[in-house]
Image (tube, grey):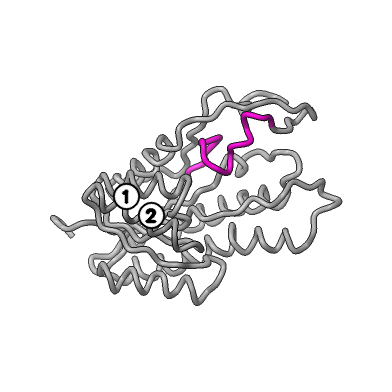
């Protein structure tokens, strides 16, 4: 691959953290495969990448659907020849509920995207990276601050993100013989459409509602691109990038 573009697959690549990461990767010379449920945002992001001189393929994909994920990686391989980097970023955050009131449908929906989706994409990426020539690649999972501590009313989201940490560790271990590195980025309060309500206030561990600071989503994208830039004999196993003053490191 010396002298050729490396290829990155980004799920949830049409907006927010995924789009920021895709743009940062494109600036670093990666060709992009953008995956997501909505075609229009994917095509818009692909156009932005083309505008900075990059190459991008957009693929409509439900990461919780096995056939969709298999087709995603088949198209990536057919279009670009290989896959060097995967950012498992797609995720959903169910509505807030006290544990006693969580609908089973919302629990299953969170598991399907946030956990099964990460597994399916990891499985396809792992097999492709193991068997391609030259072999190897890197997978980075979006764990979130919730992989460490929960917000009130978020049992389904928190459970999936804790489980993503297990996928990260298992993949990092089993990837060693195949030159497949795996790491996790835990992002706190990146400014996206999904965090727009932070300025109005979020419930804290003590039951009070307070506004929370955010950081530019481009910083999350740059952090992902840094992880992708490492040679395969080096790995960031876990990275936390967060708004400096968000209420995370203190007691609540």
Against 36, residue 94 (above or below) is: above
* Residue 48 % position (x, y): 32, 50
Regarding residue 172, the answer to whether it shows in the image is: no
Regarding residue 131, the answer to whether it shows in the image is: yes
How far apart, in angstroms, are the residues tagged by discs 2 and 1? Answer: 6 Å
Which residue is located at x 24 percent, y 47 percent?
A: 52
Magenta residue check for 200: yes
Looking at the figure, which quarter contains the N terminus?
bottom left
Which residue is most to the left? Answer: 3
Seen in the image, is 6 located left or right of residue 71? Answer: left
Against 95, residue 222 (above or below) is: above
* Residue 205 % position (x, y): 75, 31
The residue under label 2 is: 44
Q: Residues within 10 Å of mark 1 (few under 14, many from 20)?
A: some
Q: Residues within 10 Å of mark 2 (few under 14, many from 20)?
A: some
Which residue is located at x 25 percent, y 69 percent?
A: 81
Looking at the figure, which quarter contains the C terminus?
top right
* Residue 122 % position (x, y): 46, 63
Magenta residue check for 95: no
Seen in the image, is 215 located left or right of residue 127? Answer: right
Which residue is most to the bottom? Answer: 67
The stretch in magenta equals 185-201
**Circles 2, 1 touching at the beta carbon (< 8 Å):** yes
Against 97, residue 108 (above or below) is: below
The residue under label 1 is: 48
């Amino acid at each position: 691959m010396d002298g050729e573009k490396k290829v990155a697959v980004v799920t949830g690549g049409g907006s927010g953290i995924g789009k920021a990461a895709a743009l940062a990767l494109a600036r670093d010379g990666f060709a992009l495969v953008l995956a997501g449920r909505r075609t229009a945002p994917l095509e818009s992001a692909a156009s932005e990448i083309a505008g900075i001189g990059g190459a991008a393929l957009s693929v409509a994909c439900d990461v919780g659907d096995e056939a969709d994920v298999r087709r995603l990686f088949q198209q990536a391989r057919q279009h670009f020849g290989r896959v060097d980097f995967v950012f498992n970023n797609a995720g959903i955050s169910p509505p807030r509920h006290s544990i006693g009131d969580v609908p089973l449908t919302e629990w299953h929906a969170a598991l399907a995207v946030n956990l099964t989706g990460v597994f399916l994409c990891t499985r396809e990426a792992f097999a492709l990276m193991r068997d391609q020539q030259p072999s190897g690649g890197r997978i980075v999972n979006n764990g979130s601050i919730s992989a460490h501590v929960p917000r009130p009313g978020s049992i389904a989201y928190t459970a999936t993100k804790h489980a993503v940490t297990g996928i990260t560790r298992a993949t990092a271990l089993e990837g060693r013989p195949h030159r497949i590195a795996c790491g996790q980025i835990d992002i706190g309060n990146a400014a996206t459409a999904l965090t727009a309500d932070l300025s109005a206030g979020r419930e804290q561990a003590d039951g009070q509602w307070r506004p929370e600071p955010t950081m530019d989503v481009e910083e999350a994208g740059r952090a992902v691109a840094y992880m992708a830039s490492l040679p395969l004999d080096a790995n960031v196993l876990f990275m936390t990038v967060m708004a400096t003053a968000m209420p995370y490191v203190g007691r609540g």
